[in-house]
Amino acid sequence: MRPKTIITVVLLAFVVASVVWLVMKESGGISSVPARPETNEQTGSTKEDPKIPGASEKKATNRKVVAYYFHGNMRCMTCRTIEAYAKEAIQAGFPEALKDGRLEFRVVNVDEPGNEHFVQDYQLVTRSVVIAEFEGSKQKQWKNLQQVWELVRNKQAFLKYIQDETGSYLEVPN
C-alpha cells in the first residue's frame, strides 16, 4: 500500500470511531418534551393551545416565562458550558420565580422526535437559549439570546446577560 492510502484509511477509521463514540456518549440524554405553540409566521403570535406551559391547572391570565436551552444529539464542550451557565444564571438570579412557577428552565434536544418544530418556531440556526413569555395558553413574545456564543468565554458577562434578558421578561407589564 502507498503511504497516502494508509493515511486515508487511518483518518477514516478515526472519524468513524469518533462518531461512534459521540453517539454512544449522547445516547443516555433525557429531556422533557414541551408542547409546540402554533406560530403565525407573520406576527410571531401563537394560537391558543391548552398544552402550552401554564395553560392547565392555572387561570388563563397567568403569566409564565420559560427559559429554554436547545441542543442536539452532538454536543461540544462549549455547548455544554452554555447550558451549565444558563442554568446557573436562572437558578441563582431567580430562585423565587422558579419556586412560585413564574419561571421555568427547560433543556430540549431538538433532534429528538417531536421536538424538531422548535427549530422553525424559534428560528434556531445553532444551539441556543430562548426566553419565551406565555400568558395563559398563548405565547406573547420570545427572544433568542444569540450573544451566548460571544459571551461564553466570560462567565460573569454571560450570567449577567441571561439574568438581564430573563428579568426583562419577568417584569410586570405596564
Image (cartoon, rainbow, N blue to C red):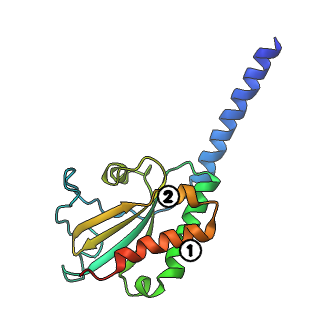
Residue occupying image coordinates x 35% and y 74%:
169
Residue occupying image coordinates x 57% and y 60%:
151
Q: Earlier in the sequence, mark 2 or mark 1?
A: 1
Type of residue at label 1?
A: Glu
Is residue 157 visible in this depiction of the protein? yes
Residue occupying image coordinates x 37% and y 75%:
168
Provide residue 37's location: percent of width, then percent of height.
26, 60
Is residue 51 visible in this depiction of the protein? no
Query: Which quarter of the rendering shows the C terminus?
Result: bottom left
Mark 2, other Cα within 10 Å: few <14 / some 14–19 / many ≥20: few
Asked whether 173 or 140 is in front, the reply is: 173
What residue would you read off at disc 1?
A: 88
Total marks drawn? 2
Whole-number angstrom distance, CA of label 2 to CA of label 1: 17 Å
Q: Is 61 placed left or right of 126 in the picture?
A: left
Q: Secondary structure at mark 2?
A: loop
Query: Which quarter of the rendering shows the N terminus?
Result: top right
What residue would you read off at disc 2?
A: 147
Provide residue 72's location: percent of width, then percent of height.
49, 51
For residue 82, what is the image quadrant?
A: bottom right
